[in-house]
Image: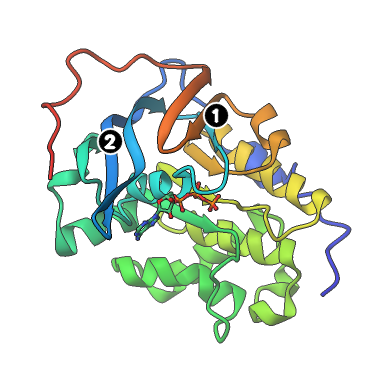
Amino acid sequence: MEEETIIDAATPAVLEKEPTVQKEPVVTIVADHLSKHFKMHGEVIKAVDEASFVFTEGQFVTIMGPSGSGKSTLLYILGSLDKPTGGELVVDGVNVMSLTGPKEHTFRRQNVGFVFQSFHLIPNLTALENVMLPMELAGGKSRADMRERARTLLLQVGIDENRHRHHPGRLSGGQKQRVAIARALANDPKVILADEPTGNLDSQNGKRIIDLLKRLANQGRTVIVVSHDRSVAKVADVRIEIEDGKIEEISGVVVPAPQPTLKKKRRR
Ligand SMILES: Nc1ncnc2c1ncn2[C@@H]1O[C@H](COP(=O)(O)OP(=O)(O)OP(=O)(O)O)[C@@H](O)[C@H]1O
């Protein structure tokens, strides 16, 4: 599939018009000694081990580390796709550890948008329908409103109108990832989580996707990107280095955890 050459997603006009970051950044994520331990054949694997940090609106965060260091596990916990075995997590003022079942699904749908390395678009839906899907699942909008919002989002991420009715199979990798980003934005979440979003793209398209994610952060979202790519860390506000499940270093604009943050650790 041919990569796009003409769209400059880094500077779509519509994105430029959206509001920029507030002066006093609002805390979106508080992690307090988060852990995820797996028991395998009598051994404990500490995939994430006592991770603590605070992120605010408008921050672009990278999580880096060697393969198997716990990056994806940490990201999935932050997005409540996975439950920690210890610690506490507050996202947008809600203690997500206390959520279960439908409440947890609703919270995730409204507050977190996911972007994956292999896009995870639904192949038999058009680009427009893929972006409409999270809105359909959330409910509360007419079909016309959903269609119009999906159309606007696709244009914002640099997907021309003539591609809105294309199925993913007819889109290039860069286009698919933009559709996936538009889908992540469908319910206007405060937090965007991306797991190796450039992993299946050439360097030029990878850079455009990072520029786009950075712009979403500049608009006031918290964008957290897991990446092996050092160039991604260069544009980050906060850089986390993780090794063997432990945060080795946090650098950049680091917000100290409020004291006392949350009630003390839960252990299972
Ligand atoms: N469901 C599971 N059961 C047991 N161990 C697991 C499970 N999920 C992850 N792990 C282990 O936890 C550790 C961290 O895995 P994780 O996938 O989070 O690392 P990663 O840094 O994202 O790796 P990669 O860069 O290769 O994707 C690894 O040792 C992995 O084998």
Q: Which amino acid, mark 2? A: Leu
Give the answer, above or below, for where 211 lies relative to 163. above
Above or below 213: residue 2: below
Give whichever of discs 2 and 1 has the lower sequence position. Answer: 1
The tag on residue 251 is none
Mark 2 vs 1: CB contact within 8 A: no
Q: Residues within 10 Å of mark 1 (few under 14, many from 20)?
A: some
Asked if residue 122 is positioned above or below residue 252 in the image, the reply reads: below
Query: Which structural element holds mark 1?
Result: loop
Distance from Cα at disc 2 to Cα at disc 1: 31 Å
Inspect this view and state whether residue 166 appears. no
Rendered location of residue 7, percent (x, y): 81, 55
Disc 2 marks which residue?
34
Instruction: In the displayed orientation, state which residue is furthest to the right.
Output: 5
- Residue 250 in the image, given as x and y percentages of width and height: 49, 21
Quadrant housing the N terminus: bottom right
Q: Count residues near mark 2 (Cα–Cα under 10 Å), then give few for <14, some for 14-19, many for 20+.
A: many
- The front one of 94 and 242 is 242
Q: Position of residue 191 (x, y in %)?
A: 42, 43
Q: Can I make out residue 155 in this image?
A: yes
Q: Nearer the viewer, residue 179 or 53?
A: 53
**Residue lying farthest to the front in this orientation:** 42
Seen in the image, is 4 located left or right of residue 49?
right
Residue type at mark 1? Thr
